[in-house]
Amino acid sequence: MADIQPATATPASLQAPAEPAVIRRADYRPPDWWVKTVALEFDLDLSATQVSATLQIERNGDHDRPLRLDCDGALPGAISVDGVAANWRHEGDEIAVDVSAPRATVHLTTTIAPDTNTQLMGLFASNGMLCTQCEAEGFRRIIPFVDRPDNMAVYEVLLRADKARFPVLLANGALVDSGDLPDGRHYARWHDPHPKPSYLFALVAGDLVATRDQFTTMSGAPVELAIYVREGDEGRTAHAMQALKASMAWDEKVYGLEYDLPVFNIVAVSDFNMGAMENKGLNIFNSRYILADPDTATDYDYDAIEGVVAHEYFHNWSGNRVTCRDWFQLSLKEGFTVYRDQCFSADMGSESVKRIEDVRMLRATQFPEDAGPLAHPIRPDSYMEISNFYTSTIYNKGAEVIRMMATMAGPERFRAGSDLYFARHDGEAATCEQFVRAMEDGAGLDLGQFRRWYEQAGTPQVQARLEHDADSATATLHLRQQFSPTPGQQDKPLMPIPLRTALIDRDMKAHRGEQLVMLSEAEQSVTFTGFARPPVLSINRGFSAPVTMDVARRSGDLLFLVRHDDDPFARYEALQQLVIDRLIADIGEEGAAAERAAALEDILSVFGDLVSDQRLDDSMRTEILSLPTEAFLGEQMLIVRPEAIHDARRALRKAIGTRLIDQWRIVHERASAVPYSLSREARGARKIKSLALGYIASAEAADAATIAFGQFAQADNMTDRQGATMVLASMACDERETALDSFYNRYQGNALVIDKWFSLQTGSTHPHVYEQTLELIRHKDFTLTNPNRVRALYWPFVSNQAAFHHASGRGYELLTDVILRLDPINPQTTARFIAPLGRWRRFDETRAAKMRGCLERILAQPGLSKDTTEQVVKSLE
Ligand code: 0A1
Ligand code: ZN
């Protein structure tokens, strides 16, 4: 009986697809064959591009296994080995080719259709131009290849195309030849002398205009710089060019690293899955990280452009010259490069504001990831789809891990470690372990236990308590570390946690110097002498370790730190903590009403002082006086209560707005009088101006809409215009519609600004944001084929905690609908939308059931991509 199928058995075609195969770090083996040189020829065409590849291959070791080429859609026509038709077969997603000699020349051809490549991986079309994206596994969509980062080869690329349609033909390296061909066609031949993995290959063909500049490296080599954009956009490239030159100079000065080709080209494209890509000598950018002028880009956009241009440029060494052995090592290049771009931006602007922004980002994206079903170490042990591992953990926590090493080493020794790393591994595909070893040897650090930061997922929790003993005049710091389990990691070993610490004298309001306390035991105590009176503890200054801190404090200590700590980050942190404590108490109705009222008075009084504190610049003032987001408050709770959080935060904003209304008005007027420029002062003024406007609106002042509309109408720059529209978008008033319509009409046809127009509405706290979002989904300018547009509409809605987590579950359904529609078009962008639903364990049973229901609905979709399947399966486990 046991082997008889029940009559109702699900037909095979309706059964859930098998889960994608798991790839494990422990299974790494070098390839059986190396590809040493690659000659590519492209006959470029939007719908049928012909590719031919000639590969010089070399057997790796003594074996008789076939050459295995990864293949994804780019099916080979003929394959020959040393000029003779080869014996080859398709095996899963590989092509196996029999080769008997230890070295051989393999030739193969494919025909691909860029205009139907909606995944935007491999060769794709964007606005009539052609361009590539090969990281991580896109090259195999162009031609079957040993498509893995440890195979480094020298490339020569010949591009042929219609000259009228594709006047510009670019590839990696330097142009060695170009000319006309019959029938209105032309060609360009590019050569890149630096061996590189296939993920760094790039080509671009299109009708583009270039902004040009030059840079002379520290050893005197001239470099021709060019930024290619669509005609009409060339007036918006100056900031990116400036950022590029500043990055080149900074890497020489700070790391001693010089550029190594005679040309450096950047191309901006409108359809791109990520921010930008560091292809050798030919960076390809999402246009949002290139194009800026005061009328269309906010100050925030200017900073983002500077940071991303630097990031991609810095990859030339941390990523390209030294690349990754396998994709498990991704943080080797990404963590280090993010750390480098963070330091660069800090040097270009304000170190303390940059640190606050980076920590805010880490807490908003990485901490929730580390606490949820998709948590993974910065060096993962396994994956199903590598595209899913371009995460905040790999990037931002990865950068924090490098920062901790830099903190422990100090600047000179850190530089010695980095010098040794580049000297040892230049031209190689390296591992995180090799980076750590170079740091140990070069910086003289013992990183034995520190390696655990690469192995363990989850945010460590640190408890701290300061005990004072008047008799011995000592202060003893008691520390404890703890970890919560993460998927696949139940018991976790201890981690070394560097905590920058100062003990501040209550009378002098100063400390005797900061110390780096290394917490490496489960519990540890450190005694400081010479404290007749109990000092105030300032710990994890500058956010020296990516941990959550639970500090036992005397009442009044946080207020003291807000007023007197000399570490700007610690000041910011103290006020955030005061606000969080107060809001969490409100939400949970914890403590006596009188106590809560007193806490509110403290906050109002310190806000009142800081609004006009002369020691703060306006940029820092804005950071300090901004309330934590609803999502971050939710993170502090075991079970998130979206409505209660929303109401409590709104009430606090109203109280701050109302009590300080006169000051907010003065600030708004003062800042409005500062003329537009990109100076630090003017940028700070614009930042505080919109914050003040927000508080005036929160106070429900009768003239709030008039003031906001005034800021909108008078704005001579996008920062003010967007700031005013953001405030109006959450208000129910006529000015709201007028501003949004005028915004739209003014910028019709400018995709990047229309993206903002979508985001301003779906991210608003307007009571009808859900209905408005539904309408925007049907708007003629909304399209699923442009990732920027999709993200512009859906991310602010999903991050809008009250709207997304509406008790009816309609927010979840709205997201599920787009996931199901988008997955067949662009799986990579789709899979990123699973994480918000995967957080169901943190919500009440009713919401959790609805979120799970949505995940199950997604998983049931026939033909669901590997990307989305991995994220859903892990989220349901
Ligand atoms: N290496 C790039 C990120 C990147 C990764 C994958 C991509 O494919 C769609 C694109 C870009 C960086 O860190 O900037
Ligand atoms: Zn990167």
Image: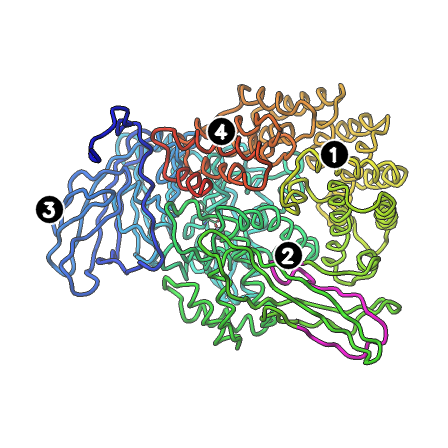
| Quarter location, residue 746 | top right
**Residue 117 appearing in the image:** yes
Residue ID at (74%, 31%): 727
Query: Picture coordinates of residue 586 (x, y %)?
Result: 77, 41
Is residue 286 left or right of 547 when viewed as pictured? left
Q: Which residue is mark 2?
A: 548
Q: Which amino acid type is shown beneath numbered disc 2?
A: Thr
Chain part drawn in magenta: 525-549
Q: Amino acid at mark 4?
A: Thr
Q: Percent from the top left, x then y, of residue 483?
A: 56, 59
Q: Could you tell me residue 284's position as x and y percent?
A: 45, 44
Gap between marks 3 and 1, in whole Å?
Answer: 69 Å
Label 3 or label 1, whichever lies nearer to me, is 1
C-alpha span from label 2 to label 3: 59 Å
Q: Nearer the viewer, residue 796 or 416?
A: 796
- Separation of disc 4 and disc 3 at Cα? 46 Å
> Within the magenta stretch, is there residue 443?
no
The residue carrying mark 3 has its beta carbon less than 8 Å from ligand 1: no
**Which residue was labeled with disc 1?**
647
